[in-house]
Amino acid sequence: MQIAYEWLFPVLWTTWCACWLIASRHVKVAVKKETAASRLLHIIPLVLAVVLLWAPMQGVPVLGRHFMRSTVQGFWIGAALTVAGLLFTAWARVVLGRNWSGIVTVKEGHELITSGPYRLVRHPIYTGLLLAFTGSAIARAEWCGVLAVALVFAALWRKLRNEERWMREQFGAAYDAYSQRVSALVPGLL
């Protein structure tokens, strides 16, 4: 399983990153952007989460301990969740189209998208990332993965709150109505 983890997950995540980078070239011009300092407050925890999931944890024994039994079934369940999460982000990215941005922005001619995965949750890219990180953590089955998922959640929740504020300013009552109908991250829960 260790060899599969060392190869499968880097291939999944690297492929996702490459596709994401290519797709980011054709977006609308931003008319309002978050500051670099604000962006770092969610980028740094995400980078730490990546390090926790993929770096060996020999130097911090407690993080290298298993939070659940490491099994072949658990590994493949984690892999399936990772793939499902990454595909969900890709679906959201396609539906969002040229309105997408890696940072909190308001675009020129910004549109409120409520179709596709945006019918299920207001922030499907974050939902998909949380699912993918959770799957990767389950496959690794170590406490470092649990900490990584907590960091990802905290970083994305912070970013989500900023986006929500900006979307309310941009779309007013339409966004308020949308947020009353559709959960932020988990349908019917959160």
Image (cartoon, rainbow, N blue to C red):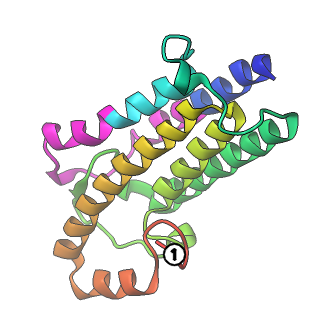
Left/right placement of residue 9 relative to residue 113 reads right
Please tell me which residue is depicted at 23% across the width and 54% down the height of the picture.
Answer: 105
Location of residue 18 in the rendering, given as x and y in whole percent from the top left corner: 53, 30
Question: In this picture, is 3 found above or below 38?
Answer: above
Task: Work out which residue is located at the far right of the displayed protein and give it.
Answer: 72
Residue 39 highlighted magenta (yes or no): yes
Q: In the image, is residue 179 part of the stretch drawn in magenta?
A: no
Residue 143, x across and y down, in percent: 57, 33
Q: Is residue 46 left or right of residue 64?
A: left
Three-letter code, disc 1: Leu
Residue 52 to residue 184: above or below: above
164 or 101, nearer to the observer: 164
Question: Above or below — where is 98 with respect to 35?
Answer: below
Which element is circle 1 on?
loop
The residue depicted at 21 percent of the width and 68 percent of the height is 165
Q: Residue furthest top?
A: 59
Q: Position of residue 173 (x, y in %)?
A: 24, 88
Q: Nearer the viewer, residue 190 or 118?
A: 190
Q: Position of residue 34 (x, y in %)?
A: 17, 48
Q: Residue at x 53, y 50 (%)?
A: 130
Label 1 neighbourhood size at 10 Å, few (<14), some (14-19), many (20+)?
Answer: few
Name the foreground residue: 152 vs 15: 152
| Residue 13 sits in quarter | top right
Query: Which residue, given by chain and number where applicable, does mark 1 sit on?
Result: 189
Left or right side of 99 for 61: right
At a point 54% along the width and 18% down the height, the residue shown is 61
Quadrant housing residue 99:
bottom left
Q: Quadrant of the N terminus?
A: top right
Q: Point out the stretch of residues depicted in magenta.
A: 16-44
